[in-house]
Image (tube, grey):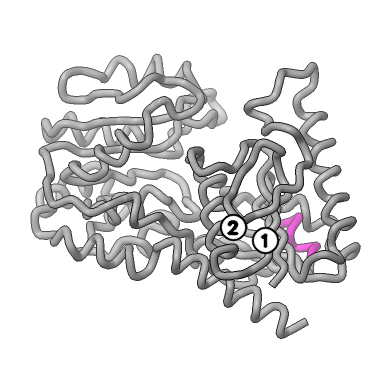
Amino acid sequence: MRILIVSTLKRKVTPDFFASRSRIIYQLAKGLARKGHEVSLLGTGDSFIEGVSIIPVVEKGWVDSPPVENEFVRQVANLLELAKKIVELQDDFDIVHSHVYPDFVPAIIENDIKIPLVITLHNLYDFYMDDLMGHFKKTNFISLSNAYAKLYKKAKIYKTVYNGVDTDLYTYSEKKEDYMFWLARLPKAKNADGSFMDPKGIRSAIKLAQATGMKLYISAPVEDHEFFEKDVKPQLNDKIQFVGKPTTEQSVPLEKIIKLYQHAKVFLMTINQQEPFGLTLAEAGSCGTPVIGFDRGAVPEVIVNGKTGFVVPYEKGVDGLKEALAKIDQIKLQDCREYIAKNFSVEKMVENYEKTYQEILNNK
């Protein structure tokens, strides 16, 4: 197949860059090329993927570009240019698969292209996305989990394809230490009263550590520094430690993040929002580390309750997390690894997308 992967313009896509969306794009494009497909990436000029042709829309991603007076206008202009490029290039490809941010943007050209358009939805659900996407009947929207797909009432979701992790990178370790690990972003998200929304649930992780006395390592890119200074920093001590610096992009080297996964007694997924997937769940499991998470979003689809971790009813809160933590030694570490390797590897993801493309092309 001749496949055009449409990338986010927010960041570059390279082997050594591990922002979640960029990582999935890299692994998918590389995996498809290895399987003999002719793959091109439409995105930033400084992207690089072995065996994949790069077609630039912008020289560098938005996070690496010099500031301009109106960032919103620049981004809209870049996205419209990207959409125009897809139309111009369509005769060279059999199918287009977009991972653009914001996700729904390429759907505006569905009537201008003759080849199938696939869009993977990475963004959190919100009603305005559903309202807009409901207008696009020809686009094949892909969900990252069944729970996420069910949130949409107007948009037609073609199918679910799970993300995958590099199980050769996130390697298994039986050597565990007596600490919990929490890894996520601290995004800018506030309630109506101006308080921090805490969508990733760092408050619950901190409360669990305080209630149990167990050591907690936190690592997070910090987009809301006010929240970090008011709600997180005052709680830090010998038992609750922040790894790295509270910078907008992740400051901790990947090798250290993997070691934190590998040696943690448990990984915490204390989300308050309906997460579309959650790569950290699969990364932890690939390292043989059990997960305790609230039953929000994709958590019950990635974690086998009682076998690879514990899925805690959200309404039980920190008390539910404590109950699960008390049982964590019941989990066999090898089960965590084997389940992720079988169901959520990069190879499985590439295989599932390859099958999806073929299904769509056969039904043209």
Q: Position of residue 101 (x, y in %)?
A: 67, 44
Q: Is residue 106 magenta?
A: no
Picture quadrant of residue 75: top right
Specify whether 277 is left or right of 206.
right
Q: Amino acid at mark 1?
A: Val
| Magenta region, residue range | 130-136
Residue 312, above or below 43: below
Query: Residue visible at 34% across and 50% down?
Result: 169
- Is residue 171 visible in this depiction of the protein? yes
- Per the image, label 2 sits on a secondary structure element best described as helix
Q: Is residue 45 or residue 242 the one in the foreground?
A: 45
| Marks 1 and 2 close (CB-CB < 8 Å) | yes
Q: Is residue 140 or residue 97 the one in the foreground?
A: 97
Query: Residue visible at 47% across and 51% down?
Result: 275
The label on residue 39 is 1
Residue 169, above or below 337: above
